[in-house]
Structures are given as C-alpha cells and as structure tokens.
Amino acid sequence: MDRLSTPGPGPSERGPSHDIWGWLAEKMYIYEIKYSPLRWYGQWGGLLNGRAGLYSLFRFALLLLLLEWTLFLPDISIIKTAMVIIIILGSILILFDIIIANSSVMIVSRSPRNVFRSVMLTLFSILQVPIVFSVFYSLLRYGINKENINSIHAIYFSFVTMSTLGYGDILPKEDAWHIQLLIVLEVIVNFYLVVIVIPFFVNQWQNIPSPPHQEHRQ
C-alpha cells in the first residue's frame, strides 16, 4: 500500500505521549481562561475586562514595585522573611503567566483575535522577563561582584544577560552558583520567547490578507 495513502492512527491508537501533550495543552488553556491574573484583573468592577494592554502595564508597574522592595527590606527577621517570600512568589507568578499566556495563544488557540496587538503585547512581555530576573538578582546581590547594587544595576545586568552581550563589568562571583543558575534560566526563557513565540506571531501577521484597496493598487 502506498505510504502516503495510509490513514493515520485513530484516537485510540495514539501513544501515551499524545495523551500527555494533549493533557498539557488542555491544562494550559484552562489556566489561561480561568486562573490567569489577567482574568482577576478583568473582574475588578468589570471596567478592565479583556483589556490585556492595561493588564500588561499593571504587571510592569508591579514588577518595578517588587524590585524596589528588594532594596528596602526591614531588619526585623519575621517581616523581612515574609516580604522576601511575597517578592519571590509574585515574581515567579508573573514569569509563569508571561510564558503560559503567550504559549497558550501559540499552541492551543493558534488564532489571536488581533495579530498586531498580540505581537506588541508579546514584545512588551519579553521586555518584562529581564525585569523579573532583575528582582531575583537584586535579592541575591551578595553573589554579584559589584557593591551597592541598586535597581538600575540589577535591570542593566539582567538585560545584558538576556541579550548575551556579556560586557563583563558586572559578574556573578565564582562561588555564586545560584546566580549562575538564574543566568542560565533567563537565557533559556528568553530563547524560547524570542526564537519560538515571536516568529509564530510574525508568521500570523504575514498571513493576514491585504485590505481590498491595497490589493486593487497592486
């Protein structure tokens, strides 16, 4: 029998790997439509429902606030520990939301309502990723070779790391393995968003049909 005419496996014949990836895609979609902070944000009086741009600005402002908190931790151990936990959990949630929200559109729905808006929001989300990591770098600033690290230094170091420029003026100490792991993780996340997610939206943008008046001019 011709191989090209052989029918593909039915749902019952597919292996366990298909079930796992299908399950992950389903959970990703459920998170995006039910549990994403964007949905919480949209329920505030119904005024901002569905306005992803305003949510992105709010998330950006929250990241800057968390970054500033890392520089003003109190000396009281209990309060300091509580603030550090809030900062870490908040930053992880934001990073997780950025990755899942963009992956959900790319993998699950595959049809953003407005491609141009999706591209702009994805670019803005990618710019927020190094700020998330700058929060972690600021918390672990004792593992960096520069003294008196402030928020600008942390953001600068994170963007240089993300872009793989590596100027070398700010470096992790040799025994700061936690900083080194963060650097590796930031590069991996950035690689995923820039090399995989962004090209998807750009491809979607290129497939948008031209308006009738432009086709007529051609």
Image (spheres, rainbow, N blue to C red):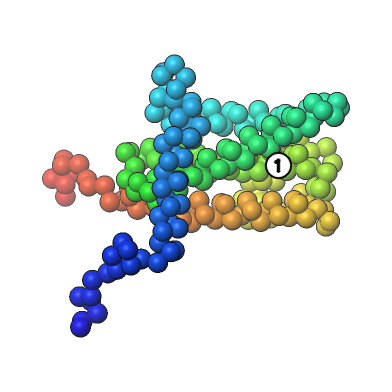
| Residue 95 drawn at (x, y percent) | 58, 42
| Residue 122 drawn at (x, y percent) | 46, 42
In the rendered view of the protein, which quadrant contains the N terminus?
bottom left
Depth check: 158 or 93 in front? Answer: 93
| Residue 157 drawn at (x, y percent) | 70, 46
Relative to residue 10, is residue 191 depicted above or below? above
| Residue 198 seen from this side | no
Relative to residue 139, is residue 73 depicted above or below? above
Amino acid on which the number 1 mark rests in the picture = Phe
Quadrant assignment, res 81: top right
Q: Residue furthest bottom?
A: 1
Q: Residue furthest top?
A: 45
Depth check: 217 or 95 in front? Answer: 95
The structure residue drawn at horizontal position 57% and vertical position 52%, both measured from the top left corner, is 189
Number of numbered markers: 1
Depth check: 202 or 54 in front? Answer: 54
| Residue 36 seen from this side | yes
Q: Residue furthest front?
A: 12
The structure residue drawn at horizontal position 73% and vertical position 55%, both measured from the top left corner, is 180
The residue that mark 1 highlights is 136
Q: Secondary structure at mark 1?
A: helix
| Residue 162 drawn at (x, y percent) | 61, 51
Q: Is residue 108 left or right of residue 134?
A: left
Relative to residue 129, is residue 77 depicted above or below? above
The structure residue drawn at horizontal position 13% and vertical position 45%, both measured from the top left corner, is 216
The structure residue drawn at horizontal position 41% and vertical position 43%, both measured from the top left corner, is 29
Mark 1, other Cα within 10 Å: few <14 / some 14–19 / many ≥20 = many
